[in-house]
Image: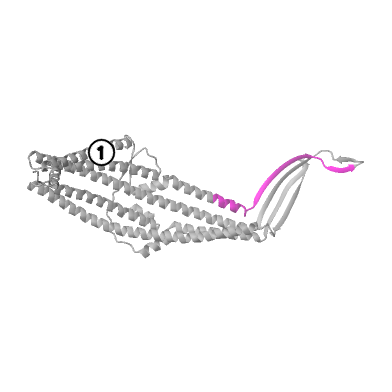
Amino acid sequence: MSGMPVSGRLSKKVEAPPERMYGRVLAALCVLAWILSASSTAWARESEALAPPENLPVLNLSLAEAIDLARDKSPNVHLFRERIETARAASRTQLGALLPNLAAIGKYNTQTFFLGTIGGRPVRTDPFDIVDGRASFTQSLFSLSLIERWRASRSALQVAELDSVTTENDTAAKVALTYFEVLRNQQMQEARSANVALYEDLVAFVRNRQAGGMATGLDAARLESQLENERQRLELAKGEVERVKLTLLNLIGIGYDLMLHLTDDMKAYEGHLPSLDSILAAAHTDRPELKAQLQRIRTAELSLRSIKGERLPSLSADGNYGLIGNRFENNTGTYNLGVQMSIPIFDGGQREGRIGQSLSEFNQENYKLVLVKNQIGMEVRDALVTLKASLEQQRIARDGLKASMTEVSLARERIRTLSSNTLELSNALFSLVRAKDNMIDALFRVNASRVNLARAKGQVEQLRNL
């Protein structure tokens, strides 16, 4: 022993018997299972704290009903509808400048007049009364500036209406995406519940085998750690369901004091991809953003013409008619009629400055049109590419789910018929869990891509039939 090399002695000290190594692994797995169990308990308490109160009214909601309800209740939609009323009132104001303006005046005066200076002293009349009742009117006969200003206000009203449609479309798309997100989380919760039940059965099965000497503590500990992991993921899924439901209620704008139950399901899509040209053609025809931007250019053009029209002469008529006298019963009718032409000459350069500003705003709207077209083109292409990829993902996920279910079935049959450990079954179950997640994620991506495609085309009514 004294002649043994130092390295050999050290290696013998480091090596441990197999029983001790097995005990260390088992202890580590037990600690891991305890940590996961504690985390799962914490998540459960937190989800209970966040869970909605009981005895709340239940709202059964389909996707089409959610979209309709959001269009009716969403504060953001109502905000843009009020902007339509603002633009309509502004248009009426501009129209009023082109229509006759009538007014009535009643006046009673007691007054004196200065007659001059007599003998170095000022002389005035004795006080006397004047009673005057009169109606007056003004009418613009021709003013290109006022005409173009009114036309610009009408164009601005159309912009407000198109912006409101855009907001409704955006709200409908957001509601649809959030609706499918709730469905995805609900399916995740259902999958986690099924996984927990499956692992509980397998843990009981392995413990029975362990009692009969056909399985080891490591086999049971491995499955128990996976069981606790699935329990933790189940509680996380429950919390996500409630969180996204709150987001959906907020988008719809109906308050939070109710229980939301979604009646639709995520469905696989087996249709064909539309062509890029057909989608672009539909987008250029139906997207309200594009129509609104074209109308903004028209509004800017009319505003510019309105300011330039101030250079031209304007023609107006005015007059009045009334009864005037020193008493109510002692009066006579008088009138005044006239036509006035106003010819602008020089205003210190203010008009030219406003023309330059309006011209710049007109050019800006044209540049924004290019940005809108580019954005629409990108959204169409992005939606089409995403839909294509999600459909392929859906196909692969479906095949993967079938394969993983076959793997689990074979592994369970193998462990029943052979005296083997549960490692193969544990791996098969892990593959099945992952395949379920992939399938749920693929279905969500397919439906979300269809929502984005309908939004990109400007045809959100298609969302009602998804």
Residue 110 is a magenta residue: yes
Q: Residue at x 17, y 49 (%)?
A: 427
Q: Give the residue at x 36% y 64%.
A: 276
What residue is drawn where x is 44% and y is 53%?
166
Q: Nearer the viewer, residue 356 or 294?
A: 356
> Residue 457 occupies which quadrant of the picture?
bottom left
Image height of 78 relative to 460, above or below: above
Tell me residue 103's x, y (percent). Answer: 67, 47
Q: Is residue 79 magenta?
A: no
Q: Is residue 175 among what the camera can see?
A: yes
Q: Which residue is mark 1?
A: 40
Q: Residue furthest front?
A: 3
Q: Position of residue 41 (x, y in %)?
A: 26, 36
> Is residue 175 placed above or below 35 in the rendered structure?
below
Q: Residue furthest bottom?
A: 277
Q: Secondary structure at mark 1?
A: helix
| Residue 395 position by quadrant | bottom left
Front residue of this view, candidates 437 and 53: 437
| Highlighted magenta segment, given as a residue range | 88-117
Q: Quadrant of the N terminus?
A: top left
Residue 30 placed where, x, y %? 18, 39
Q: Amino acid at mark 1?
A: Ser
Total numbered labels: 1
